[in-house]
Image: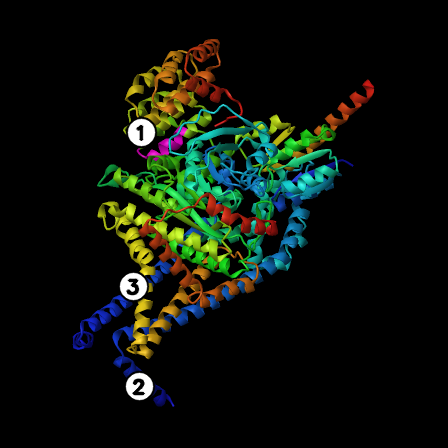
């Protein structure tokens, strides 16, 4: 069962995403701020990280940067979900290594689809690597 | 008994009248102060009790409401199966719970639904709306719209627009002329979002300014609402007397890259207000209006600094390469630091063969201070 | 009539002077108390208006918008090594789409700068720095190589011995039209920028009116030049790495009094003035300013001991001199928590400085006092501050001396004297209680009713304990101003401040 970390300071959004993803067979862990997220990221390697951009303690860009910084997390799919419409920030998120960006309000179906796509990509990548060996 | 009391009071009054004026004033104030202090304490305690009760109620209700929404909407079986949202049914028993008849609960329900709507659109968003109408919360909102309190009316407008519920013109239009600026702005926003026919009618008739904050809201509504037909904003640039509408239209023109508006904006350059003129120049730059370049360079010397800077920024945005020499002159010889900075940025922005060789040349010949400016502007770490 | 006969039948010159003085003090005192009462009413209207207006405002709209104006956050730091990282992180997580954080290392002698460089991956950049406002030389400017911290700019400068000097250097680097002035050790609300920029964006621009069928454009643009919010004490609050977790009134008595005083000064004072567009000052701990006007007015004056009020005064004077309408706004929500001095020594030094700063301000800008050309500032703000802020400690002190003289010479009319004292006492308790009530209207900051009432009860002992202290330190400040004693602040003052601060910050974290 794929592991997903969701970081958002809006508890309603957190619960909602958790419910939706659980229903589709994902294992979901949540964090409400940057600090919590860092602690969780230190212990576990997730398949997908979904993060908001404006968070207490550390912003979403930092989260993205931190995930990418760690070798073990190289294959983690990162989806930024935020209401920020500022293009520069979005570009920055991609530069730091985000895989996808969804603007709030989001479509639940779309989120699910993108998660599945990222996981599929990741699997094909790892398969490729093992074949090569 | 009654007479005793009256005579006692009378006696006290007589005594009181014998006191000097200052002492009388002082006594009156002591009396007032004690009463007001006691009332304040009462009020503080009452408010605290009130909010305590509310919080307790919320702690009890929130999970129930969230569960309802989760079960009926988020985890609805029929979602994602290409069934039209209109045909998705809710569990009638769940939504007709007695609890949901209380006005307080209904208000919390509306607020929670709105919070979800802010996070979800698409099928889930539609289904949230359906839940709102099916539970008849729509009536609650309309009832609020009919009250006399302006803040309640605004609340109703926000709820209805968030839920995308049409409001009849006869109800909405009078509000857009309200003397209360906050209510006016809210109803204007509601009109633009909800009226599918002529959302920009306001631009013709608005006499009151659209405040910058209201512009944020209108901008969001205009750019986010799906079915709004985007008009040619140059119309208002040419004919509106309302400066705030013209400035706002300039922002929209830049956003939608309406090239056809360029001549109308060039006309604006003769306006007396130099802040306003700066907006116009800025917009020309964003549109990359090459035909305006000559005009901008011609008027340059007669402009105040803020417009000069905008012209230099605009030349950088247009990047036609025709005025590189002008930018270089300004960079080397302007006495204003901000002009120099922006000239350097604009030259760099050209990013053409000519501009690059110009920069190398400048770096070789100019003084240290100017070199530092160029280095500063070329540094990718310094963004603003 | 009786009063006048009394007045002349008493005989000697001293008696007449005494009676005259008594009446003058009574009238002065009563008018002061009435002014407070009036402010309380004005402030209530202002708060209610704010609450109603903002009840349905969706503040998130500005986060999403590309039209959001940019803001430069300016925070000077001097020897803040222990807390600098957490506090900088907190400044980097405001809910706002377009802002930069300018940290000014004001010649720290500890490892403040090294810590910043390490933590935020800073490198020195070639920066074309231009001095628009005077400050001590800027040595180096740093930026982060990590894009996650691209908002951060760190200035390393020679110590200027004042916050004004450091802030000026920050303004010189500021890229945006608005700047937020704060201290690096203040705990700020996440929504500070949104809440403070809103009043700037609610300013009327121009109005088109139809007069007799002719369309007329009326220019009644009232530019908002500054905006402030309420400050409170952080002393007993729970703070986690620069983030406010739980608000609590200070447990120790001195900061507790200050908390009460701040609430009264901000919620009742500043909000009241806001209603009649006469806000005198935006506190140095937290305020948002229009950069263009601040620069044209000459920025902060490093010689002023009340540099915050001095700047607002000069900005206002600049606007008036250029025949432009302006306003200074206040929002009734607490956005900033600051450390209040816990020892009498530090507190006394702070208050003496304030007193001295006020005296200095009044004398520097004396041309504004009663000058109708400066509008509300000349006719309301300055006279009020002159009579009721500057003169109050002096008159009060003289009043006490006079009472002592009356008691010694046995001339005192005890019943009357007691009534007058009770009058002043009950009234001051009322004003404070009302201020605390108004504060509860906007937001219930304290979790328990015990905390709230506990703070309210301080009003009963304030006139005996806290108030005489303030009066004494203010007089001390005036005295220093008159004899022109060299004021040493900046380093010394801050060093005196830091041990207590560090201790309590660690405790709080």
* B378, above or below C78, in the image: above
Q: Are marks 2 and 1 in contact (CB under 8 Å)?
A: no
Q: Which residues are magenta?
A: B241-250
Query: Please, what secondary structure does the residue beneath circle 1 have?
Result: helix
The residue positioned 48% from the left and 48% from the top of the image is C56
Query: Please, what secondary structure does the residue beneath circle 2 have?
Result: helix
* A2, above or below C471, in the image: above
Please check the rendered image and state whether residue B281 is part of the magenta-colored stretch, yes or no: no
Q: Is residue C277 visible?
A: no
Q: CA distance from mark 2 to mark 1?
A: 74 Å
Left or right side of B208 for C76: right
Within 10 Å of the Cα at label 2, are there few (<14), some (14-19), or many (20+) other Cα atoms?
few
- Which residue carries the number 1 mark? B274
* C69, above or below C275, in the image: above
**Which of pointers 2 and 1 lies earlier in the amino acid sequence?**
2
The residue positioned 34% from the left and 15% from the top of the image is B294
Q: Closer to us: mark 2 or mark 3? A: 3
- Which residue carries the number 3 mark? C31
Within 10 Å of the Cα at label 1, are there few (<14), some (14-19), or many (20+) other Cα atoms?
some
Please say which color scheme the image uses. rainbow
Q: Quadrant of residue C405 in the image?
A: bottom left
Residue C345 at what x, y percent from top left?
Answer: 47, 55
- Which residue carries the number 2 mark? B11
Q: Are marks 2 and 3 in contact (CB under 8 Å)?
A: no
Label 1: chain letter: B
């Amino acid at each position: 069962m794929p592991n997903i970390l969701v970081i958002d300071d809006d508890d309603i959004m957190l619960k909602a995403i958790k419910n939706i993803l659980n229903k589709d067979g994902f294992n979901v862990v949540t964090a409400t701020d940057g600090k919590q997220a860092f602690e969780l990221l230190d212990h576990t390697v997730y398949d997908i990280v979904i993060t908001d951009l404006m968070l207490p303690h550390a912003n979403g860009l930092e989260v993205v940067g931190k995930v990418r910084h760690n070798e073990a997390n190289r294959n983690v799919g990162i989806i930024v979900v935020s209401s920020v419409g500022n293009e520069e920030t979005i570009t920055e998120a991609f530069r730091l290594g985000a895989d996808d960006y969804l603007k709030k309000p989001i479509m639940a179906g779309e989120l699910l689809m993108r998660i599945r796509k990222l996981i599929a990509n990741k699997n094909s990548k790892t398969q490729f690597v093992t074949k090569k060996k | 008994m009654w007479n005793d009391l009256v005579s006692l009071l009378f006696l006290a009054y007589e005594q009181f009248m014998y006191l000097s004026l200052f002492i009388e004033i002082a006594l009156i104030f002591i009396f007032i102060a004690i009463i007001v202090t006691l009332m304040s304490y009462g009020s503080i305690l009452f408010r605290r009790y009130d909010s305590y009760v509310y919080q307790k109620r919320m702690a009890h209700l929130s999970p129930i409401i969230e569960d309802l929404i989760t079960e009926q909407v988020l985890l609805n079986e029929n979602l994602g199966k290409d069934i039209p949202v209109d045909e998705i049914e809710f569990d009638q028993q769940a939504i007709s719970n007695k609890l949901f008849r209380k006005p307080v609960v209904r208000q919390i329900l509306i607020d929670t639904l709105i919070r979800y709507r802010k996070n979800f659109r698409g099928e889930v968003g539609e289904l949230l709306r359906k839940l709102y109408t099916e539970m008849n919360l729509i009536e609650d909102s309309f009832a609020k719209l009919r009250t006399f309190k302006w803040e309640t009316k605004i609340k109703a407008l926000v709820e209805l627009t968030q839920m995308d519920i049409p409001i009849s013109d006869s109800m909405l239009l009078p509000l857009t002329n309200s003397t209360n600026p906050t209510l006016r702005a809210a109803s204007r926003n509601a009109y633009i979002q909800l009226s599918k026919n002529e959302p920009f009618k306001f631009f013709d008739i608005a006499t009151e300014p659209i405040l910058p904050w209201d512009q944020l809201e209108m901008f969001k509504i205009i750019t986010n609402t799906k079915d709004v037909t985007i008009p040619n904003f140059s119309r208002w640039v040419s004919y509106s007397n309302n400066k705030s509408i013209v400035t706002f239209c300039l922002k929209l023109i830049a956003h939608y890259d309406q090239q056809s508006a360029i001549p109308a904006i060039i006309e604006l350059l003769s306006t007396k207000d130099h802040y306003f003129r700066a907006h116009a120049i800025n917009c020309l730059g964003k549109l990359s209006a090459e035909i305006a370049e000559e005009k901008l360079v011609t008027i340059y010397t007669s402009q105040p600094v803020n417009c000069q800077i905008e012209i230099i920024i605009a030349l950088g945005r247009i990047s036609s390469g025709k005025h590189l020499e002008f930018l270089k002159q300004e960079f080397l010889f302007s006495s204003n630091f901000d002009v120099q900075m922006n000239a350097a940025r604009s030259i760099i922005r050209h990013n053409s063969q000519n501009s690059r060789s110009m920069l190398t040349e400048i770096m070789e010949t100019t003084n240290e201070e100017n070199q530092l400016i160029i280095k500063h502007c070329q540094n990718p770490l310094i963004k603003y | 009539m009786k009063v006048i006969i009394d007045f002349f039948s008493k005989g000697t010159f001293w008696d007449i002077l005494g009676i005259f003085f008594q009446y003058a003090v009574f009238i002065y005192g009563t008018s002061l108390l009435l002014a407070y009462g009036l402010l309380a009413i004005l402030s209530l209207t202002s708060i209610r208006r704010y609450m109603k207006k903002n009840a349905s405002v969706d503040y998130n709209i500005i986060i999403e918008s590309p039209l959001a104006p940019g803001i430069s956050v300016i925070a000077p730091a001097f020897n803040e090594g222990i807390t600098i990282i957490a506090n900088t992180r907190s400044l980097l997580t405001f809910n706002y789409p377009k802002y930069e954080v300018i940290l000014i290392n004001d010649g720290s002698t500890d490892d403040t700068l090294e810590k910043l460089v390490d933590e935020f991956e800073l490198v020195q950049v070639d920066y074309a720095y231009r001095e628009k406002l005077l400050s001590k030389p800027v040595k180096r400017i740093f930026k982060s190589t990590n894009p996650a911290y691209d908002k951060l700019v760190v200035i390393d400068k020679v110590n200027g011995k004042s916050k004004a000097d450091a802030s000026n250097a920050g303004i010189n680097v500021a890229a945006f039209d608005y700047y937020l002035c704060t201290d690096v050790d203040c705990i700020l609300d996440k929504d500070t920028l949104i809440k403070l920029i809103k009043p700037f964006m609610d300013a009327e621009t121009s109005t088109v009116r139809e007069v007799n069928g002719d369309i007329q454009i009326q220019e009644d643009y009232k530019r908002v030049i500054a905006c402030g919010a309420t400050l409170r004490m952080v002393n007993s609050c729970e703070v986690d790495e620069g983030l406010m977790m739980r608000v609590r009134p200070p447990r120790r008595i001195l900061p507790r009094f200050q908390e009460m005083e701040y609430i009264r000064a901000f919620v009742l004072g500043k909000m009241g003035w806001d209603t009649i567009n006469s806000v005198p000052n935006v506190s140095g701990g937290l305020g948002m300013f229009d950069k263009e006007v601040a620069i044209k007015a000459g920025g902060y004056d490093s010689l002023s001991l009340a540099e915050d009020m001095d700047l607002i005064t000069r900005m206002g004077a600049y606007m008036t001199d250029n025949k432009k309408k302006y306003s200074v706004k206040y929002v009734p929500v607490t956005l900033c928590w600051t450390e209040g001095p816990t020892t009498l020594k530090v507190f006394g030094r702070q208050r003496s400085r304030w007193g001295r700063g006020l005296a200095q301000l009044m004398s520097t800008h004396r041309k504004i006092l009663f000058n109708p050309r400066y509008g509300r500032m000349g006719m309301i703000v300055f006279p009020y501050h002159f009579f009721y802020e500057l003169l109050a400690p002096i008159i009060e002190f003289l009043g006490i001396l006079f009472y002592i003289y009356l008691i010694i010479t046995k001339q005192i009319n005890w019943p009357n004297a007691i009534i007058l004292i009770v009058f002043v006492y009950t009234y001051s308790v009322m004003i404070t209680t009302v201020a605390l009530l108004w504060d509860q209207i906007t937001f219930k900051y304290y979790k328990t009713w015990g905390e709230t009432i506990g703070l309210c009860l301080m009003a009963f002992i304030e006139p005996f304990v806290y108030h005489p202290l303030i009066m004494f330190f203010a007089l001390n400040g005036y005295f220093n101003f008159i004899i022109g004693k060299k004021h040493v602040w900046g380093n010394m003052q801050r060093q005196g401040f830091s041990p207590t601060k560090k201790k309590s910050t660690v405790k709080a974290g």
